[in-house]
């Protein structure tokens, strides 16, 4: 055993020429004591999932990881609801079997319609949720609770989607389907309302007018889906199916209220010389 002066630290460290020599010269307790006093270095952690940069940033990222997992599971469940048609051997010509398969696939058109529509809507909720939650800079318990409520509604979409695919001509199926998406929009709007409270202290600040326009943009799909649910409950299925047309209408209205950014002034503008 020899004492080696480590240039990076003021205290000497113990160096061994072999592991056997270390075991012979130091007792087990002294060896563990030496290891415990050795400085440990770890790579700095980076937070790629959110703008959080405080000590509780890992809690913010856990919310995002959990939410992404729920979205992934929801999309997977919807895909698992797609069951391929089974054509049993009938002993007839192969052309007849092909026709039977095509007929079975045609009968699945409502199921595929419900799947594609639900996939698009869940994807829309994920994009909006990602945009809202990435701006969160510090953990907030109220935000976490409302995020769970939003996940509760999103996790019910596979059920209403499957019900709609099997009962496309039933008004109640459309009403429940649009109601689930209207609730998702409502909870997501409340989630942004909670995150942006107190002048946006949780997201680095936000102007009142910007907050208002973003709230209007967020609640627009909810109003459209609520109108679709109301029409479906009234028995007007065909009008209910077209409720999504109202979404760009509300989005255009919210965009008109959004504050316009002023163009940067050039050197000629600052000197008072007209540009042209």
Image: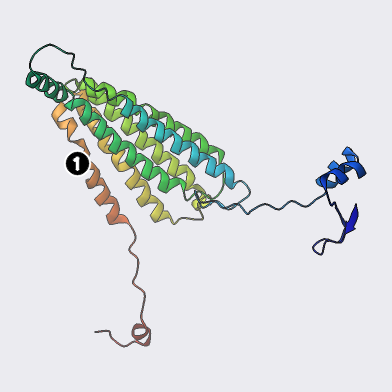
Is 34 situated above or below 240? Answer: below
Helix, strand or loop status at disc 1: helix
Residue 144: x and y in percent read 52, 37
- State which quarter of the image contains the C terminus: bottom left
Residue, x 35% and y 51% (percent of image)?
Answer: 213
Percent x, y for residue 75? 35, 32
Identified at 25% across, 25% down, the residue is 175
The one of 266 and 234 positioned closer to us in this rendering: 266
Residue 64 on image: x %, y % = 48, 41
Whether residue 207 is situated above or below residue 33 in the rendered picture? below
Q: Decide if residue 87 is in sight here.
A: yes
Q: List x then y, in percent, for residue 210.
A: 39, 55
Q: In percent of the image, x 21 and y 41: which residue is there? A: 246
Side of 84 relative to 159 (left or right): left
The answer to whether residue 236 is visible is: no
The residue drawn where x is 49% and y is 40% is 65
- The one nearer the camera, 97 or 165, is 97
Q: Badge 1, how many Cα within 10 Å: few under 14, some, many 20+?
A: few
Q: Which residue is mark 1?
A: 245
């Amino acid at each position: 055993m020899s004492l080696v002066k480590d240039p990076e630290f003021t205290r000497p460290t113990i160096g061994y020429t072999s592991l056997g020599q270390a075991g012979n010269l130091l007792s087990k307790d002294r060896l563990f004591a030496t290891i415990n006093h050795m400085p440990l270095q770890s790579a700095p952690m980076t937070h790629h999932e959110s703008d959080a940069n405080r000590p509780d940033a890992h809690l913010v990222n856990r919310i995002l990881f959990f939410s992404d997992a729920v979205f992934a599971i929801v999309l997977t469940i919807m895909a698992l609801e797609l069951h391929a048609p089974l054509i049993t051997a009938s002993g007839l010509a192969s052309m007849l079997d092909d026709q039977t398969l095509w007929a079975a696939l045609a009968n699945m058109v409502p199921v595929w319609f419900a799947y594609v529509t639900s996939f698009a809507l869940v994807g829309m909720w994920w994009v909006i949720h990602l945009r809202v939650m990435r701006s969160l800079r510090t953990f907030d318990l109220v935000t976490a609770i409302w995020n769970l409520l939003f996940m509760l509604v999103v996790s019910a979409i596979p059920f209403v989607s499957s019900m709609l695919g099997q009962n496309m001509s039933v008004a109640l199926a459309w009403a429940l389907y649009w109601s689930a998406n209207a609730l998702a929009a409502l909870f997501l709007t409340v989630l942004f309302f909670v995150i942006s409270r107190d002048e946006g202290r949780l997201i680095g600040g936000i102007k009142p007018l910007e907050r208002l326009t973003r709230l209007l943009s967020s609640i627009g799909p909810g109003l459209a889906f609520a109108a679709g649910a109301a029409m479906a409950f009234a028995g007007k299925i065909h009008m209910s199916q077209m409720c999504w047309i109202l979404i760009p209408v509300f989005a255009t209205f919210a965009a008109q209220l959004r504050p316009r950014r002023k163009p940067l002034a050039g050197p000629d503008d600052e000197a008072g010389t007209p540009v042209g």
